[in-house]
Image (tube, rainbow, N blue to C red):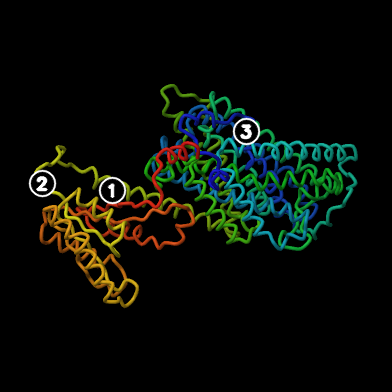
Amino acid sequence: MSLTRFLFGRSLANKEAEGRKIGVLEGLPAMGLDGLGSAAYGSEAMLTVLAVTGAAGLSAIGPITWVILILLAIVFLSYWQTIATYPSNGGAYTVARENLGTDAGLLAAAALMVDYMLNVAVGISAGIGALASAIPAIHAYTLPFCLAVLAVVTLVNLRGTRESGLVFAGPTYVFIASLAVVLVTGASMAFTANAHPAAVIAPPALATAEPVSLWLLLRAFAAGCTAMTGVEAVSNGVGAFREPRVRHAHRTLAAIVVVLGLLLLGIAYVARAYGISAMDETAEGYRSVLSQIVEAVFGRGWIYNVTIASVLAVLCLSANTSFVGFPRLCRQIASDGYLPKAFAVPGRRLVYTAGILFLAGGAGLLLIGFGGITDRLIPLFAVGAFLSFTMSQAGMATHWLRAQTRDTIRLGINGTGALATMAALIIILIAKFEDGAWLTIVIIPATLVLLRIINRYYANLDQQLLQPVERRLDLSTQSPPLIVIPISRWDRVSQNALAYALRLSPDIVALHCTELSGPDAEEIVARIRTDWQRDVEAPAREAGIAAPRLVVEPSPYRSVLAPLLRQIAGLRADQPNRCIAVLIPLLIEARWWEVLLHTHHERRLRTALLRHGGADTAVIGVPWQLQPPDPGRGIAEEEQG
């Protein structure tokens, strides 16, 4: 078994695509980990802002959470309609583009791309933060652990969406069950103790209280809105569900929102009851809010270990939501000509490999740039999500306005969603601007400009390639090409290339460059001339055909390219109506390790010739194989992966 097949699995045929689709069971871990995991760092982000106010801030977490839940319900109803109206990946990009115009669609796409990339970085960093709160010894190694988790999640997603959903299903459902037990138990104890339960392990004392101001409440709301990120993932990935896809997508969205809402409400209530606030993540002895909650309710027993392990897994794996949605979003954008075409091509496992690798690379740079610390990444978060929320809901409202039969109820739902998310976006921008949100405001327009530049390139390319041409094939010039063959010595590889050239044209020039390895000895040139006269010119005369010419040129800079281009220019000047073909002798290694023993100058030469040789110059590789070819083996490797 090859290493590639071991890591990524066998190649999948196109006919297997439907079998790779997912249902609700796989959909919840595949597309809901972001939303579910954000309950942990969203609540902690709120408490981080409110920490300076002491007990007074804890009193405010309940009302703020209820406002967020109302906003979550509005967004849920809006996306429920979006999925039904656009069952083929009706994300913010599609909805905004079709209803608000191309620029609005691209703005939504840029916002989503940035949001997805930040979600990967924030989710993984929050997960490692949870691990560091349970095992303080790894606190100094936060960044390496983050990058290791990123590599694992990337590898699993390269194997396929269905595989990622199945692999992550266990941690997801353990997370839901264990956290439900902790929160229900904690809430019950708080209720029976008149909201003053005794903690098994008491949380740290609250900080000296500062007054609770409206500005502080708005900042806490903005921080808590990060808990809503990921809700849009289902609408962006409807195409990943098996039929009936709308029903499966609706059920998955409903499950995500209901579980997320209950988690947010439970965390807020238990944290207030036990007097739990956020701690400084960069300081030694850091314990996450969820870690403090489990300690307060059950102490540090097996329930603590199971719960924190599941929290760690879900937070780290919440990046999976982006790995499902981001490649599909990029595929749509690339199909419209705003991203490189590679983003629209499925890989060996019927996933969009280019999008997965690009997302992993961008998230890795974010983790490195911010040291894997969640508190440093959170201020950048939620701007892209709420901008895409707003664009999507505004697009849906416009859709209902333009409909032949106006649906007032649906228009009201999407219109309310657009206004609510826009208001939240404004608050987030103002509250988080100085903390780092300004960077997102710069990155999103820069991404928009980049998309436009790529599209302009493709438009210019199509203009050049599809401009009016003579449709009938021009057969007026049918002379064979002028052939040039670069050779380093006379051997079986060169002989094979020359024999092939003689089947194409009688006009052949073999070019040998001297000084390729430094000062060239005269005997090397003399030897190749002698070999040429004996093994090429003499047989050609005996056969009554024109003998190929041998040209020897110096190469003071030890490169074949410049002498070869000069030779091509000379042939073009002498016979301007003839096309030119450069035949490059290629040695094909028999074993993988033999590749390491050769320089592969021929492949680099081919690339340079295609760029600089001109439109009338063809480059042909003529292989000499050290091992007899086996087409059957190649077909089997392609089909089996």
Kindly give the residue lying farthest to the left in the view shown: 476
Rendered location of residue 383, percent (x, y): 55, 49
Badge 2: few (under 14), some or many (20 or more) residues near its Cα, within 10 Å? few
Q: Nearer the viewer, residue 227 or 159?
A: 159
**Distance from label 2 to label 1 (Cα)?**
27 Å
Q: As shown in the figure, which amino acid type bears the numbered disc 2?
A: Thr
Residue at the spot 54% in from the left edge and 23% down from the top edge: 244
Residue 29 as seen in the image, left or right of residue 2: right
Which label belongs to residue 451? none
Give whichever of discs 2 and 1 has the lower sequence position.
1
**Residue highlighted by disc 1:** 461
Residue 214 percent coordinates (x, y): 67, 52
Task: Give me the residue at 54% from left, 27% from top.
Answer: 242
Q: CA distance from mark 1 to mark 3?
A: 41 Å
Q: Is residue 567 above or below residue 222?
A: below
The residue that mark 2 highlights is: 477
Amino acid type assigned to the residue bearing label 3 in the image: Glu
Q: Nearer the viewer, mark 2 or mark 3?
A: 2
Task: Residue type at mark 1: give it.
Answer: Leu
Query: What residue is shown with label 3?
Result: 26
Inter-mark Cα distance, 2 to 3: 61 Å
In front of the other: 549 or 580: 549
